[in-house]
Image (cartoon, rainbow, N blue to C red):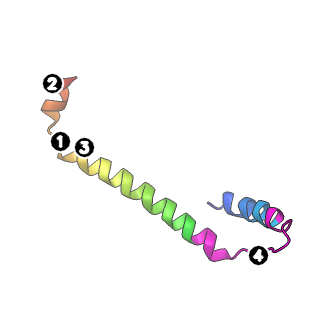
Amino acid sequence: MLLASPLAWWALSNWLGTFAYSTGLSWWIFAVSGVAATSIAMLTVSFQAIKAAWLNPVTSLRAE
């Protein structure tokens, strides 16, 4: 996030500057996208960890 945000801001500001009706970029766009990506990743990993913790290891070993 710390590396990608400045690079994305630079690339997007250069790209958006080429249009006739250009718009600016705000810092909160990058903050919201970073928080959203981190939240989705944490929810996914947490769900998989909880699901694995509730499984019976005997049935898992027997199936393999």
> For residue 28, which quarter of the picture?
bottom right
Q: Can you tell which of label 2 and label 4 is closer to the viewer?
A: 4
Q: Is mark 2 on a helix, strand or loop?
A: helix
Q: Do the residues labelled 2 and 4 touch (CB within 8 Å)?
A: no
N-term mark: 3 or 4? 4
User: Which residues fall within the magenta stretch?
Assistant: 14-31
Q: Mark 2 points at which residue?
A: 62
Q: Are marks 2 and 3 in contact (CB under 8 Å)?
A: no
N-term mark: 2 or 1? 1
Question: How far is mark 3 from mark 4, CA to CA?
Answer: 47 Å
Q: Which residue is drawn at 33% across and 54% down?
A: 46
Where is 31 relative to 1, above or below? Answer: below
| Image spot of residue 19 (x, y percent) | 83, 67
Q: Can you tell which of label 1 and label 4 is closer to the viewer?
A: 4
What amino acid is labelled 4 in the image?
Answer: Thr
Question: How far is mark 2 from mark 3, CA to CA?
Answer: 15 Å
Q: Name the residue under label 3.
A: 52
